[in-house]
Amino acid sequence: MTEPERVCMAAEEKFALAPADPETTVALLVLTVPLGVLSLVGVAVGISDPAELPGFLAFLGGVVLVIVLLVAVLFAFTPTAYILDAQGIRIARRFARPVLVPYARVRRVALRQFPGPPNIVWLGSYPLRGFFGYFGRFRVERLGWIRVYATSWDGEMVVLETDREPYFLSPAEPQKFCEALRARLCGTAA
């Protein structure tokens, strides 16, 4: 490998994620609509019986607190970019530590098309799918255990077959990502 190729392999390449699935919007609506309804009920309770209002506001505050904490935790783990660097594929996340998949663990890179999110048999690391994307470990029919760090199942996904379990990624430009990754995998094998 020549010196310019070695320098190129050491530089970081950053890839954006595909646009989010409509399920993300639906998941947010599922949380915000009930809060709006509860707020309207609280106004009605306050108008009809002002003595009941403090108890209802305490209940509403507890519900809002739980939902805000859940959203904050899930938002922290949301994948934001895929970065190819000297060590491997780094999956950047909003506020959580990035996930690193070393090049040495990657056995094969493939592009796959999916008609939509697969049937999840068993939830792994994270409880909700479609909420700010898909991330974590899941058990899926006919695929077994997989790790997903994606925003969308529409279009092509990059599947990294590793020595443990496959990783499913959704870069905005999957072909370009695969080409860059394969170049790095060939460069580390040399």
Image: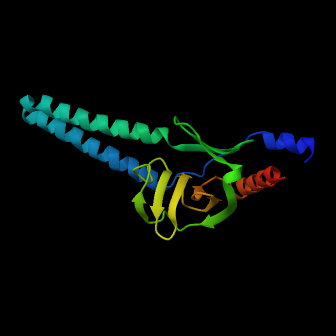
Determine the residue positioned at 71% across, 50% down: 103
Determine the residue positioned at 27% across, 46% down: 34
Q: Nearer the viewer, residue 60 or 86?
A: 86
State the image coordinates of residue 185 (x, y, percent, origin top left): 76, 53
Query: How was this image coloured?
Result: rainbow
Determine the residue positioned at 9% across, 29% down: 50
Horizontal side, residue 172 vs residue 145: left or right: right
Q: Nearer the viewer, residue 120 or 44?
A: 120
Which residue extends farthest right? 2
Whether residue 112 is situated above or below residue 66 in the rendered picture: below
Determine the residue positioned at 91% across, 41% down: 3
Give the mark count: 0
Q: Nearer the viewer, residue 103 or 39?
A: 103
Horizontal side, residue 116 vs residue 32: left or right: right
Whether residue 32 is situated above or below residue 155 in the rendered picture: above
State the image coordinates of residue 117 (x, y, percent, origin top left): 48, 62
State the image coordinates of residue 127 (x, y, percent, origin top left): 39, 50
Whether residue 4 is situated above or below residue 114 in the rendered picture: above
State the image coordinates of residue 107 (x, y, percent, origin top left): 69, 60
